[in-house]
Image (spheres, rainbow, N blue to C red):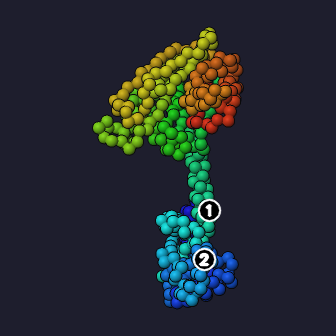
Amino acid sequence: MAALQHPATQSLVIKVPTINSDETNAQVLQIFGENRDLVSLPVLDDDRPIGLISRNIFMSQMSRPYYRELYEKKTCIAFMDKSPLMVDVNTPIEALAARAVEFGDKTLADGFLILENDKFIGVGAGLDLMHALVELQKEKNRQVMQSIDYASVIQRAMLSESLNAIHATLRDVDIVWEPRDIIGGDFYHFQRYEDGWFAAIADCTGHGVPGAFLTLIASSSLTHALSQYGARDPALLMATVNRGVKLALGQHSATQHAHSNDGMDAAFFWFDDASMTLTSAHAKMPLFMLAPDQENVQSLDGERLGLGYADTPADAVWTNHSAQLAHGTILCCFTDGLIDQIGGRKNIAYGKKRVRLALQRHRARPMPELTRLLMEEFQTYQGAQTRRDDVTLLNLRLE
């Protein structure tokens, strides 16, 4: 991507008439009369600017009773601003804007003097400076959006291996990953093993660019933990990821002041194919289960303790929850962007109850269709409300 070119004051130079400091106010009147669009008249002394005469101020003064008779033959410095903004032609636009703010409203109204090697070459208009700043900001925004769009490609590529593994392993499954912005702070991980599979859903602090950066740290910590300990002990993996995130963010010492307090909520799962046993650990993220012979949705909530945060102990431990599940059991895991979304007639959170009811209502449908219907109901509930957070949702049926 090309580097952003910072325009300089050169682009704002306007050639205008000038007047020498020893010339009279009568000559100022003549110049303003001949140049109806001239806002300000630079005053020079041997090609070096010493001041600026504002048309508005000058004309208002000379229109007062007897002022013309008193001042017409006097030198033009009588109504001259002796301290206008003067800038070098190579001054960056942003630096010029900062100086213009320091000089106050007169710079916007009357303009400023532009110099090259301390000699006058033209004036700049306050309105032109504002337009240049707007265009510069547009270009910055365009390049930032290009960077974010490309970051989205990278983030989706990071998830693609897990997405492919999910669909290669499970026949009735669907996953939703919807960043609130173009990139987000949610991520998922899925890995197939000879005797089972491992899955993780995680919701990192924030969304957009900060959240996406944190997903890289958290995902890397999880990958390292899996390579070190394997996938069969989700609670141990959580403890390891907790320490890794705290260390990466400088939040590992309770006695050391941390510059951030970031981390993630997560659920880690290990499923054993032979025994149909699901072992899971939860950091403030529930798992819903709906068995084929049960009417109600069961929930596993786990610990109310997030991973990696400054106030989460480095030696914190999580608990493994094991359950032997029947064929046809539906598992549903989601980040809080789903249940915390405001909407409906009362403008309250979507809540877990609506997710439970959707699972019960559509339990006979294939997971892609169930997920589609749930998300349609969710979006209808959201209505005109702004999306509050990233949303990730995993629905699967054990076969």
Q: Residue furthest left?
A: 255
Q: Is residue 45 left or right of residue 362?
A: left
Q: Residues within 10 Å of mark 1 (few under 14, many from 20)?
A: few
Q: Residues within 10 Å of mark 2 (few under 14, many from 20)?
A: few
Give the amino acid type for the residue marked by disc 2 in the picture.
Answer: Arg
- The reply to whether residue 228 is in sight is no
- The reply to whether residue 71 is in sight is yes
- Please give the count of numbered marks on the rendered protein: 2
Residue marked by disc 1: 135
Which residue occupies 55% across, 43% down?
A: 208
Give the amino acid type for the residue marked by disc 1 in the picture.
Answer: Glu
Which residue occupies 44% across, 23% down?
A: 303
Q: In the rendered image, which quarter is residue 304 located in?
A: top left
In the image shown, does 6 or 44 lie closer to the viewer? 44
Which residue occupies 56% across, 46% down?
A: 154
> Does 283 appear above or below 219?
above
Residue 144 screen position, x and y as percent? 57, 54
**Label whose residue precedes the other's in the sequence (2 or 1):** 2
Q: Secondary structure at mark 1?
A: helix
Q: In the rendered image, which quarter is residue 53 located in?
A: bottom right
Q: Is residue 296 left or right of residue 244?
A: right
Residue 389 screen position, x and y as percent? 57, 36
In the image shown, does 32 or 18 lie closer to the viewer? 32
Judge depth for marks 2 and 1 and give the one in front: 2
* Image quadrant containing the N terminus: bottom right
Residue marked by disc 2: 64
